Amino acid sequence: MESTRTIVVYLYPGMTALDAIGPYEILRGLPGAVVQFVARQRGPVTVDSTFLRLQADLSCDEVTRADILVVPGGNAPAQMRNPDTLAWLRCLYPTTRWTLSVCTGSLILAAAGILTGGEAATHWSARETLRQFGITPSQARVVRRGNILTAAGVSAGIDAALTLAALECGQETAELMQLFIEYAPQPPFTAGTPETAGPGIVARAEAFLRRDAAP
Amino acid sequence: MESTRTIVVYLYPGMTALDAIGPYEILRGLPGAVVQFVARQRGPVTVDSTFLRLQADLSCDEVTRADILVVPGGNAPAQMRNPDTLAWLRCLYPTTRWTLSVCTGSLILAAAGILTGGEAATHWSARETLRQFGITPSQARVVRRGNILTAAGVSAGIDAALTLAALECGQETAELMQLFIEYAPQPPFTAGTPETAGPGIVARAEAFLRRDAAP
């Protein structure tokens, strides 16, 4: 019998769905994986676009430990101001082997005091906010500091989860999941970073983000 | 006022979550996008891992048209044997401008008679099954035939959706969404295709797929 590996994915209103589902689709394949989708309250959680609801099967009150904790980004500011969320993350963190933030999830870890100083990754649009916590925003796609991995925006969670899978279970297991999701990416365009997208696309993306963040 | 663009994402028990969420995260940013998550019945739909439920807000009976239809993969065989699903897809397809299958979703389109002859993409493990429908499995990541795009396994839906976004709204809009999800992938390993993963990893992935498909 293989032992259980508990992976807790935190869900909250206004989160970005792919931030959570990308890492989930890798980590759920680890030997003995049990993935728990957890929110303040049990039930459907509406994501940033308002078009989709992800089901939380457990409430934060029911979850007191995790081997791996995943914190997605999206409407991070509301979480950064929520003392219950921050207290829960602070209690959970010492029980984990690994904590992974995706996108603006790193801001939530910073607000909780789990991520302090040094370098971290976040969504390109949030780099200056990270600086306000005394953390240097990295242009790297994945940054590891001790047992915390921070990923850049949204899709970077897939790369970070593969890195985490290899740290936790070895490279072969990570490669197995890379092959399962057939992750040999071929983006048809090169606009994946603000540096390569150019100022016109960056301005449009910033306007999109403002609309998305509106209530 | 911009006009509405209706994107229908079909959900079913045993589907692979990332197959749907990858394209959704791109297509939901198209101007005027309204994304509808649709299943046989309204309510939560349990995905292949059994760890996650995605909420369907509409039932198939309530949805009679789509500008863009997305059919994910996963437990495709049950859908290929379901006459109600196949009839619904056959009714919906003529109303669409674009239909996108991800992973073994192409098998469902083939079973419905929507995809016939020629080449198509599917999950690497399902290439031979595609052949049984008289369709040549392509090793390309995204195949376009007329108004149907077929993507390879799971993560290929992101690349295909960017291609589709450019066809529907122009390259700049696709680039905007590529930048939003910061899609400048850096897989830490090269095991994303059976050709690059090597036989040991392929054998382990096939065993994983068999376990995943078990009821």
Image (spheres, coloured by chain):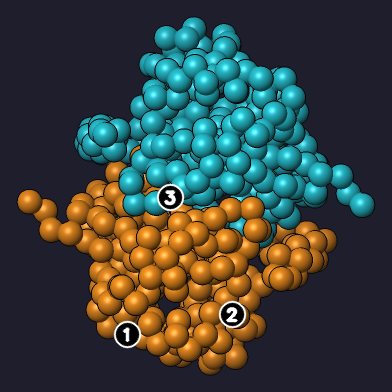
Chain colours: A orange, B cyan
Q: Name the residue carrying label 2.
A: A78
Residue A206 in view:
no
**Where residue A10 is drawn, which disc sits there?**
none
Alpha-carbon distance for marks 2 and 3? 24 Å
Local crowd at mark 2 within 10 Å, few (<14), some, or many (≥20)? few
Above or below, B98 against B5 in this view is: above
Give x and y (percent) for residue A194: 69, 65
**Where residue B53 is drawn, which disc sits there?**
3
**Where residue A91 is drawn, which disc sits there?**
1
Q: Is residue A46 left or right of residue A38?
A: right
**Quick one: SS at disc 1?**
helix
Above or below, B184 against A139 in this view is: above
In contact (CB < 8 Å): disc 1 and disc 2: no
Q: Residue at x 51, y 12 (%)?
A: B135
**Quick one: SS at disc 2?**
helix
Front-most of A135 and B67?
Answer: B67
Question: Which chain does the numbered disc 3 sit on?
Answer: B
